[in-house]
Image (cartoon, coloured by chain):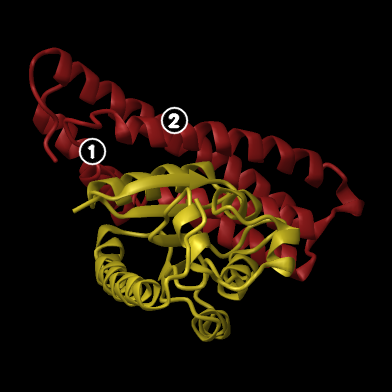
Amino acid sequence: MYSVAQLVEYTSSLFQQGFLDDQFNQLQLLQDESNPNFVVEVVTLFFEDAEKLLNQLEKEIGQENNIDFKRVDALVHQLKGSSSSIGAQRVQRVCIAFKNYCEEKNVEGCFKSLQDIKQEYTLVKTKFETLFKMEQQIFAAGGSAPR
Amino acid sequence: MAQFHVLAVDDSVIDRMLIERLLKTSSFHVTVVDSGTKALKFLGLVEDEVRNEKPHSIAAETDQVVEVNLIITDYCMPGMTGYDLLRKIKESNSLKDIPVVIMSSENVPSRINRCLEEGAEEFFLKPVQQSDVNKLKPHLLKTKVKNEDDLINNKRRIHNNAIPLKN
């Protein structure tokens, strides 16, 4: 059973480690009694969107020496935008590096970036899932997550 | 006083959800669409009509079905960009007075200037925040006053010239 103190500490660590930035705070500000699940809803949407984009990126990068850099850049641009919108800072940062490789038409760089993005995405997804689980437990026990 | 109606345009599903929530917390009535084409359709303007459009008439004003007080659009969208949409709105006699705000994830000064020169009221960098949305009300109130003045002047003209209104 998680305590509020543990939740606060965990959230704080996510900011410290750069997984989350201030935009996540902005999301929390938009959640209230009339929209009590706003943060979970947006983040869930981000997961769905990101997974679609990652699948498409795999296909494009899989072309190896025939990579359509414009197409890859467009896909990464979308992921950069959505990760920025929810405050997923580390994912956003890898997207920026990825875009630079696209511009340089650097195949190796693109390969590496794809791996980095998959890694960062998996990490942040796990972090979010833990965060939401903690909040849900506290809420179910009659507490409320601090904002 | 009726609520202001804002039309938001963005191809990103996450950003649509965000902007809708941001606008609703400011008590705006919100419609969200995912493309410039759909925005024009919603505004009652389809591609061909823009070119063949007749000059603004009093009758057209009374026929207006949808009233939109502000349009906020993403810049980077496939097909019709936010800039293209801005231009089409400013070229339209019935829509040119609606304030338009552009949003973009990229801070490109030439892009910003282009939009402002084309008539955009504001340019917001994404992610858009509450502090940005708070800047919208003055633009809406300014247009409201102008519309009320126009309405008063038009009514005065009708009274003086006895132009029959289309039913």
Element type where label 2 sits in the image? helix
User: Picture quarter containing residue A62?
Assistant: top right
Q: Which mark is residue A44?
A: 2
Indicate the position of residue B81 as horizontal and vertical percent values. Answer: 64, 63
Is A32 positioned to the left or the right of A114 in the image? left
Indicate the position of residue A48 as horizontal and vertical percent values. Answer: 54, 31
Label 2 crowding class (10 Å Cα cut-off): few <14, some 14-19, many 20+?
some
Dot 1 amino acid type = Gln
Question: Mark 1 or mark 2, which has the lower sequence index?
Answer: 1
- Chain for mark 2? A
Compared with residue B11, is residue A109 higher up or lower down, i.e. above or below?
below
Indicate the position of residue B162 as horizontal and vertical percent values. Answer: 42, 71
Picture residue at 48% right of the left edge, 38% below the top: A46
Compared with residue A5, is residue B22 higher up or lower down, i.e. above or below?
below
Q: Colour of chain B?
A: yellow
Element type where label 1 sits in the image? loop
Label 1 crowding class (10 Å Cα cut-off): few <14, some 14-19, many 20+?
some
Residue beneath disc 1: A31
Q: Which chain is red?
A: A
Marks 1/2: CA–CA distance: 15 Å
Residue A1 visible in the displayed image: no
Compared with residue B87, is residue A102 higher up or lower down, i.e. above or below?
above
Are the residues flagged by discs 1 and 2 in contact, CB closer than 8 Å? no
